[in-house]
Image (spheres, helix red, strand yellow):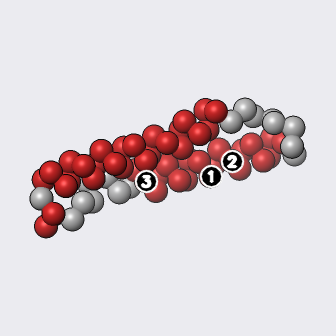
């Protein structure tokens, strides 16, 4: 059962990361290049966060 839960957690983290990555390059053009650069930096930071969360969660925690 722990392996199933761990696998579901991995898929959830991967799905969250994919949704964040898809926002890269989608800043509103009307806001200008500085906003766009900040937008992409934010997307990168948000998409890297789930990787850190997954790395800190041991597999098979014995729930």
Q: Is residue 54 found left or right of 34 in the rendered image? A: right
Q: Is residue 6 above or below residue 55?
A: below
Q: Is residue 25 found left or right of 6 in the rendered image? A: left
> Would you say the residues marked 2 and 3 are in contact, meaning their CB atoms lie under 8 Å apart?
no
Q: What quarter of the picture does the N terminus occupy?
A: top right
**Crowding at mark 3 (Cα within 10 Å: few <14, some 14-19, many 20+):** some
Tell me which label, 1 or 3, sits earlier in the chain: 1
Tell me which label, 2 or 3, sits earlier in the chain: 2
Q: Return the x and y of residue 2 as percentages of the image width and height.
A: 84, 42
Residue depicted at 80% across the width and 40% down the height: 3
Picture disc at residue 12 = 1
Residue depicted at 81% across the width and 36% down the height: 61
Q: What secondary structure is marked by label 3?
A: helix
Q: Return the x and y of residue 40 as percentages of the image width and height.
A: 28, 48
Q: Which residue is mark 3?
A: 20
Q: What secondary structure is marked by label 2?
A: helix
> Would you say the residues marked 2 and 1 are in contact, meaning their CB atoms lie under 8 Å apart?
yes
Q: What quarter of the picture does the C terminus occupy?
A: top right
Q: Is residue 43 found left or right of 52 in the rendered image? A: left
Q: CA distance from mark 2 to mark 3?
A: 17 Å
**Crowding at mark 1 (Cα within 10 Å: few <14, some 14-19, many 20+):** some
Residue depicted at 71% across the width and 50% down the height: 8
Foreground residue among 33 and 12: 33
Q: CA distance from mark 2 to mark 1?
A: 5 Å
Q: Is residue 58 above or below residue 24?
A: above
Q: CA distance from mark 1 to mark 3?
A: 13 Å
Residue depicted at 15% across the width and 51% down the height: 34
Foreground residue among 53 and 1: 53
Q: Which residue is mark 2?
A: 9
Q: Return the x and y of residue 51 as percentages of the image width and height.
A: 53, 38
């Amino acid at each position: 059962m722990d392996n199933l839960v761990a696998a579901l957690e991995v898929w959830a983290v991967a799905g969250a990361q994919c949704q964040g990555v898809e926002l890269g390059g989608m800043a509103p053009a009307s806001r200008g290049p500085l906003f766009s650069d900040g937008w992409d930096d934010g997307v990168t930071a948000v998409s890297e966060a789930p990787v850190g969360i997954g790395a800190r969660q041991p597999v098979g925690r014995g729930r």
